[in-house]
Amino acid sequence: MDNILFVSIFCLLIVAHGTSGSNLSDDFAILAMLDDLDIEEGEEAELFDLPSWTSERGSKVLVNVDGYGAKGDGVSDDTQAFVNSWKQACSTPKSVLLVPQGRSYLVNATRFRGPCVDKLVVQIDGTIVAPNEPKNWDPKNPRIWLDFSNLTRVVFQGGGVIDGSGSKWWAESCKKNKTNPCKGAPTALTIDSSSAIRVKGLTIQNSQQMHFVVSRCDSVHLSDIQISSPEDSPNTDGIHITESTSVVMQNCKIATGDDCISIVNASSSIKMKTIYCGPGHGISIGSLGKDNSTGIVTKVVVDTAFLKGTTNGLRIKTWQGGNGYVRAVRYQNVRMQDVKNPIIIDQFYCDSPKSCQNQTSAVEISQIMYQNISGTSESDKAMKFACSDTVPCNHIVLNNIHLEKTDGTAETYCNSATGIGYGYVMPSAECLTSSDNKSIIKQKNEAELATPSQEYPVHTEL
């Protein structure tokens, strides 16, 4: 935000709100801090092109999985060849581990552990496929497929495909068939306990559950990644960030059966730029606070995103009974098309086969900004701030919002949520500043205050 414009708007709002100036000061102080989270255009990792591998240049040592016995026919088990080639590449300075183009490699659940020598490149140009039979999965690794850990300054790149062969896993999910037991399934690609990691150009598809997890990492840059699975594939989050800091996602296209991006506990300084999402459940912070746990997420920026046909747009979801907080979040320059819940904060999230018990403690949500958000909503409530009566949402800022219902009248729903709006805001969000903390604002030709609603937030998966 331009500093002169920022100060001008701030002064005008102080005058307009009079004695509430101290609260506005708090709101705008955090927005000034959020400016430091801007994503620079053209920010890229240092990557390596194929010509630099040649022996004439001598700058890289090529470790080809075919040279370690991989068949690449999609039928033979190439797991050991991948393990052996990893050991060689990991211990060889300036090496490139190559998965060649035009071949398909069947690999079972494997942990690729570091530390490795500096400047390792993992070049995936071919296809890596998982076994498609859940009952034959390695019982020692029930939740992982390709798991990389304890790495520093490693680059993953290429135009290849990581295919989780997840259809039979989905069929066995309790979300597909309620007679099935609810149990976990593998994540296709995991990067854990690592730093200074770059991932560029890969396609990850048909994961058993989550496609790509970044866990306990610092300084991770993900760019030009494509993720896809069917709209009805359960729990197939696209990119899942947990316990990580300084993560940047740029130019990613994600279509899944769950959240396109999900950010959960102990994560901060998470930046997203030019994200395409749909189908899926949107871009989510959470869920947080399940089973009375503590959840903390701070300093999150979404800048430039397009969401189409998703069940949610920009969502923050927390369970009753949790603790912790979500703070300093900025959503800007987002376009939505036929999204069911374009803007939603839900402190009553309950993804459970049975109803959740009402509890007074909650994850606190504050310092949230929505700026330049437009598009169409499939539900009446284009904006929904369903917050706890005992731990209300506060310091919500709306600026230049234009959300319309696909056919009909859009509304804003507020329960125990306070904040401010400036610039153009449609549907009107006067309920954020109303003394009545439970109300719905309808948007017609002109904004008009509706009769306060007694509706209580719905405790269901959205």
Image (spheres, rainbow, N blue to C red):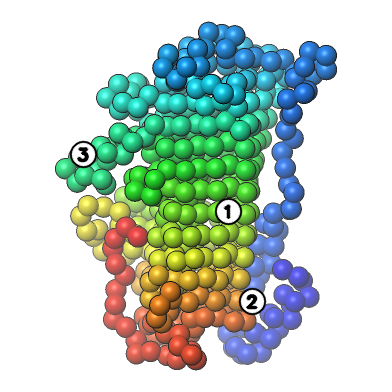
Q: Residues within 10 Å of mark 2 (few under 14, many from 20)?
A: some
Residue most extreme to the right:
57
Dot in front, 1 or 2: 1
Please tell me which of labels 3 and 1 falls first in the chain: 3
The residue at the point 32 percent across, 83 percent down is 453
Residue picked out by circle 2: 25
Numbered label attached to residue 181: 3
Image height check: is 11 above or below 218?
below
Residue picked out by circle 1: 275
Q: Is residue 56 left or right of residue 263?
A: right
The residue at the point 47 percent across, 49 percent down is 255
Give whichever of 283, 299 is nearer the camera: 283
Residue 66: percent from left, percent from top: 57, 12
Residue 85: percent from left, percent from top: 58, 13
Mark 2 residue type: Ser
Q: Quadrant of residue 137?
A: top left
The residue at the point 71 percent across, 83 percent down is 11
Q: In which quarter of the image is residue 90?
A: top right
Report how far apart the C-alphas of labels 1 and 2 lie in the structure: 31 Å
Residue 42: percent from left, percent from top: 74, 49
SS at circle 1: strand
Give whichever of 92, 21 is nearer the camera: 92
Dot in front, 3 or 2: 3
Q: Are marks 1 and 2 in contact (CB under 8 Å)?
A: no
Q: Is residue 141 left or right of residue 102?
A: left
Image height check: is 190 above or below 174?
above
SS at circle 2: helix
Report how far apart the C-alphas of labels 3 and 1 lie in the structure: 34 Å
